[in-house]
Image (spheres, rainbow, N blue to C red):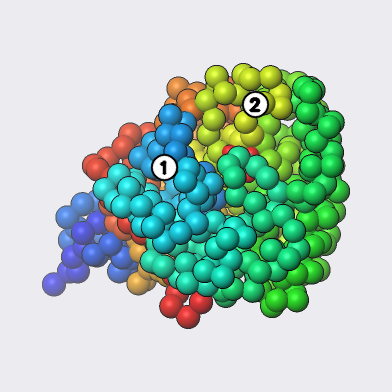
Amino acid sequence: MSESFDLVVHGGTVFTPGGPVAADIGVRAGKTAAIGDLKSAKAAERYDASQLVVLPGVIDEQVHFREPGPTHKEDLESGTRGAVLGGVTALFEMPNTDPPTTTEAAINDKLARANGRAWTDYAFYVGASPENAEELGRLERLPGVCGVKMFMGSSTGSLLVADDENVARVLKFGSRRVTVHSEDDMRLQERSALVKDGADVSMHAEWRDVETAVRSTERLIRLARQHHRRVHVLHVTTAEEMDLLSAHKDIATVEVLPQHLTLAAPECYQRLGTLAQMNPPIRDARHRDALWAAINAGVVDCIGSDHAPHTLEEKARPYPRSPSGLTGVQTLLPLLLDHMAQGRLSLARLVDLTSAGPARIFGIAGKGRVARGYDADFTVVDLKAKRTITNAWIASRAGWTAFDGMDVTGWPKATIIRGQIVMRDDALQGTPIGAAVKFQETL
Ligand code: DOR
């Protein structure tokens, strides 16, 4: 008797841990149950992946949605909808909402809101503050929590842990990896006169300069070593930090963003104005080249989107009253596929950065590879598709992307989460089935 499956994805090139192989995938009860020739297997549903590549589901470990709080920019439904349209199967959401996610009640509130409304699987960060430092060891282990987020420099929202004493307190309580927005707040305050009374937005990278980032990352690494705590440095933007971080791979993992890999100053500020304003800022081509070199040297562990929606109206305020942040969860994969088509990274490296990398950093249980026993999360891509990224395609309530009008090669064809097809050919399928991501018990 032939085997039977809930779903068979057939005829594609499957990106297994050993690399690409021509194979079918059989899914049962939401998990990958077989990889091989399943031509004669029974299947309740079949997806024809001929001419397509089946990647492990893309995991975006850094998004900012706005719920609870300013949901006119984004909520959990619209944010996760954009994600599945862009080929993302799971995401971790940041705590700088209103109220910030710093208590058990706030975490449970987000989990309740996500239930039945999230299109992707999800987990939430607990925000570190001087007030909740002692609580973090307990909060970081609650179901649905991916870890701790600490802002060492002020950005959107009120979360801030600026001084060494409090950074040390945050690092002391708990054992999972602490993710960090690394900009030195003291230096940001000292230099705020540069932009306070209005300035051109290109001054953003001057105010939040290289030294601001380097100083903070040096402090962080020193304190992480003192307290034997693993850290994950988010959105690294400078050549100097990459040199530093390459010497501390045993304790610090590294994230970079497509924004910093794709855009460069001064051109981005001339062309996009405040639409290119974000923290940490987009810098010149010397730094962008260094980020690519760090990707190819293996210093970078993952790529997230830092999806940070603000409306066009808010962005139109005169700098520096314009808020910082770009949408990105939907364009993460198309931009990376295009970089791959341009020869800047291999498909193996892309998979490592968007799937295996986040799984490794955060100790995600059962995701991050196409393998028997793992969740059947697949991002099916057409590497040859020629498409144009447009604002009209963007699901975010913000309604815009800095990459509007950009022609790209490579596009997500289907998003499959635990064996359910939730997006195919740019259209949503079914209802939001997202569930909380699970983590390895021992971490
Ligand atoms: O540009 C940014 N925007 N950087 C951050 O750290 C926060 C984000 C937001 O939430 O708007």
Instruction: Find the distance from the CA under tag 1 to the CA under tag 2.
Output: 21 Å
Residue 291: horizontal and vertical position, in percent? 75, 49
**At 17% from the left edge and 69% from the top edge, which residue is drawn?**
2
Give the residue type at disc 1: Pro
CB of mark 1 within 8 Å of CB of mark 2? Answer: no
**What is the residue that sits farthest to the left in this orientation?**
1
Query: Is label 2 in a helix, a strand or a loop?
Result: loop
Residue situated in front as seen by the camera: 223 or 412: 223
Which residue in the protein does label 2 denote? Answer: 322
Residue situated in front as seen by the camera: 79 or 138: 138
Residue 40: horizontal and vertical position, in percent? 21, 62
Residue situated in front as seen by the camera: 161 or 238: 161
Give the residue type at disc 2: Ser
The picture quadrant for ligand 1 comes to top right
Label 2, residues with CA under 10 Å away: few <14, some 14-19, many ≥20: some
Residue situated in front as seen by the camera: 127 or 276: 127
Q: From this viewpoint, is residue 43 visible?
A: yes
Residue 147: horizontal and vertical position, in percent? 52, 63
Location of the N terminus by quadrant is bottom left
Query: Is label 1 in a helix, a strand or a loop?
Result: loop
Quadrant housing residue 321 = top right
Which residue in the protein does label 1 denote? Answer: 68
Rendered position, 172 above or below 203 = below
